[in-house]
Image (tube, coloured by chain):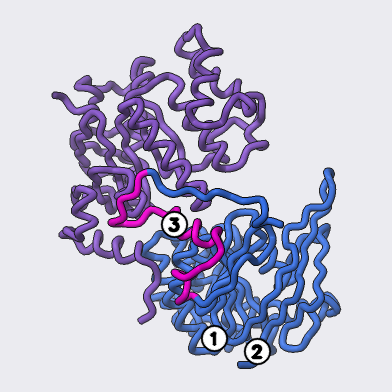
Chain colours: A blue, B purple
Amino acid sequence: MSTLLEVNDLRVTFPTRTGLIEAVRGVSFSLGRERLGIVGESGSGKSQTGRAIMGVTPPQAEVTAKTLAFDGIDLLAASPRERRALRGKRIAMILQDPKYSLDPVMSIGRQIVETLRTHEKVSKAEARDRALAMLEAVQIRDPARVFDLHPHEVSGGMGQRAMIAMMLIAGPEMMIADEPTSALDVTVQLDVLGILDRLVSERGMGLIFISHDLRLVSSFCDRVIVMYAGKVVEQLKASELGRAQHPYTRGLLNCMPKIGADRHPLPVLDRKPEWAA
Amino acid sequence: MTAALSVDRLEVVFDRFRALKGVSLEVESGESFGLVGESGSGKSTLLRAIAGLAPAASGTIAVNGKTLGVRRDKAFYREVQMVFQDPYGSLHPRQTVDRLLQEPLAIHGFADGEKRIQRALDEVGLGTGFRFRYSHQLSGGQRQRVAIARALILEPSILLLDEPTSALDASVQAEVLNLLEEIRRRRKLTFLMVSHDLAIITHMCERLMVMQNGEAMENLTADDLVERRVTKDYTRNLLRASEGFVRT
């Protein structure tokens, strides 16, 4: 399997008044055309890992790595111009809440067309046709109507579909999805995941799925990386999650209430300082 | 025995939109009752209507057999307290934990504030070290503990819980759920709990009601859910969704 993304010893450091905070502390992994899940709790550095790969880390933070290469391109050595050309075209990112990550004063259709025309030379009419086709591909029933709607006029599930359409229209090779379904209802969640799953496998993309929900990730991804305090504590096949070795992974799996399991009180995580070492 | 909480054909209307369409509900004293449904199903509106935060257009709400008027009196809030979903939004950003906990005591004219604050903080497992902190100095789980302490400080008999753990990490969620269960056992409280997560509701509650579009779909016991004895397709969908993603 060809490697799409190579990450070796990635570190993201934020300067604060009280000193340097290392949000990501030496993360290494590689990604082919597969679905990779990154799981961890708030503050584990999972989102910052995704942002560093995308190149949208806040300007005050420092990103270093031995290797951070996408398809042979050294991302840290690339000029802002080169990275801009990659972003949206070859690497796309879906964010958590469509309410905040879509432009509120632009119709959904215009936002999709904007992405396409930034990266490809196409006529307005063709761009519109392709945007409509893309909206249809994410199972929006009446694409022509939704094209002219503004983000506040659609539901969360519909907004997230529009975001997926926007991200996929330029035909990226890799997609980073940062909690793409956490803001959605459970029933809508599955629809959106189904759409994402189909499009990713049809197009043979590499997917990085960032989430706090270990169970959801393991049912969706091929491989799972578990992060704790900025580090990878365990990497394993999603199908082998039941055989996780690290006490943190096992604790995370264990502490969720399950239907039919009568456990009172629930087991809680006993955090050991050496996990973060 | 009269029910601790009884809601009869409650309607809530916002600008001609019927958020609740004649919902009835009975919760026995000491029972833990769950409300499940997706966003817009009216589960939070029902809770807010009971607390007096949403206007009831018609129908009645009774607590311990006493029917409530439009304005809730002080005695009501000593019986019924609420814990909100977002611990980042429900604590005053410029008040210390101590000041936050004094507010309900001052309103209700309690003299032994000092002792009560200490006891409430101990009870939620925070200890007095947190007493003079601001909410931004606390983690999400600690904030939710403060919110629970604030609800408990008046020693209510009924606690309304609106998605108390959905903003928390899974491991912190387990801690808060354990805390709530322990408090309920110790104080013999009645819970009315809203969640979109069936697993949490079956873990915490004996009985539950599934809601959709402002209507009660069905009433179930937790055992019914475990045994999959459900009659409505909507509930089945929720059950399936709670099992995670299945590739087709």
Task: Return the residue at label 3.
Answer: A254
Going 35% across and 27% down the picture, which residue do you hit? B186
**Looking at the image, can residue B198 be seen?**
yes
Q: Quadrant of residue A277?
A: bottom right
In this image, B15 relative to A130: left or right? left
Q: Quadrant of residue B244?
A: bottom left
Going 61% across and 73% down the picture, which residue do you hit? A176
Quadrant containing the N terminus of chain A in the rendered view: bottom right
Asked if labels 1 and 2 share a chain, the reply is yes
Task: Return the residue at label 2.
Answer: A122
Picture coordinates of residue B173, whole percent (x, y): 47, 47
Which chain does tag 3 point to? Answer: A
Q: Earlier in the sequence, mark 1 or mark 3?
A: 1
Q: CA distance from mark 3 to mark 2?
A: 52 Å
Secondary structure state at the residue bearing disc 3: helix
Going 56% across and 13% down the picture, which residue do you hit? B114
Task: Return the residue at label 1.
Answer: A130
Callout 1–callout 2 Cβ contact below 8 Å = yes
